[in-house]
Image (spheres, rainbow, N blue to C red):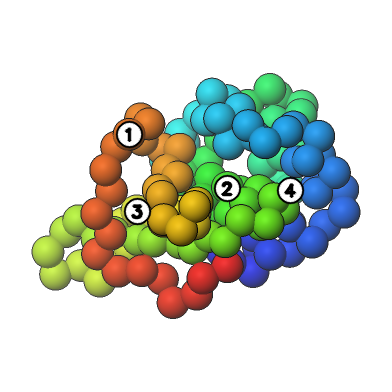
């Protein structure tokens, strides 16, 4: 996920498109995001999702897809961010949900487009790598 976000953020075409959306890009993506659960994992890159936005008028995916896109957007805007993950099932070691945290005015805030604004996320384990 981190590698996909970094690659997209370095992609000149992706950068131009994100910057042209303005600083409210995360809100715009929230209003155009459709959650799509997966029986098997399908990786959607930030570039792929942005293409869907341009051609379909919306982006779709699961939590890791939208988190990777949001992380790439934040990197384009020069905002420090990191992935956080939760585990809901006792005894299960796989991550069951992932979201992004962004450093805003010295405080880490949650950006999770799969949940309503204001939802409080309690992470169980932070992924190893800040972006």
Q: Say which label, 2 or 1, has the lower sequence index.
A: 2
Q: Which residue is mark 1?
A: 118
How many C-alpha atoms fall within 10 Å of the one at disc 4: few (<14), some, or many (≥20)? some
Which of pointers 4 and 2 indicates the residue nearer the eye? 2
Residue lying furthest left = 90
Provide the secondary structure element on which disc 2 rests.
helix
Q: Residue at x 74, y 48 (%)?
A: 47
Outermost residue to the front: 105
Residue 110 is left or right of residue 25, and the answer is left
Q: Is 67 situated above or below 60?
A: below
Marks 3 and 4, how far apart in space?
22 Å
The local secondary structure at tag 3 comes to strand
Dot placed on the residue nearer the N-terminal end, 3 or 4: 4
**What mark, if any, has residue 97 been given in the picture?**
3
What kind of element bears circle 4?
helix
Estimate the x, y position of residue 105 in percent, counting from the top left.
Answer: 49, 52
Q: Secondary structure at mark 1?
A: loop
Image location of residue 71, percent across then percent down: 58, 54
Give whichever of 110, 127 is nearer the camera: 110
Residue hosting label 4:
47
Classify residue 66 as left or right of residue 101: right
Q: Cα distance, mark 2 to mark 1?
A: 17 Å
Q: Nearer the viewer, mark 3 or mark 2?
A: 2
Q: Residue at x 53, y 60 (%)?
A: 81
Residue 24 location, quadrant: top right
Q: CA distance from mark 1 to mark 3?
A: 17 Å
């Amino acid at each position: 996920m981190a590698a996909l976000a970094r690659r997209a953020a370095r992609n000149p075409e992706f950068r131009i498109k994100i910057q042209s959306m303005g600083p409210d890009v995360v809100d715009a993506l929230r209003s155009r995001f459709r959650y799509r659960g997966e029986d098997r994992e399908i990786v959607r890159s930030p570039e792929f999702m942005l293409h869907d936005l341009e051609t379909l008028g919306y982006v779709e995916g699961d939590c890791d897809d939208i988190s990777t896109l949001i992380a790439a957007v934040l990197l384009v805007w020069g905002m420090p961010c990191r992935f956080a993950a939760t585990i809901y099932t006792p005894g299960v070691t796989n991550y069951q949900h992932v979201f992004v945290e962004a450093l805003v005015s010295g405080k880490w805030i949650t950006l999770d487009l799969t949940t309503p604004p204001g939802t409080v996320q309690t992470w169980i384990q932070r992924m190893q790598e800040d972006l």
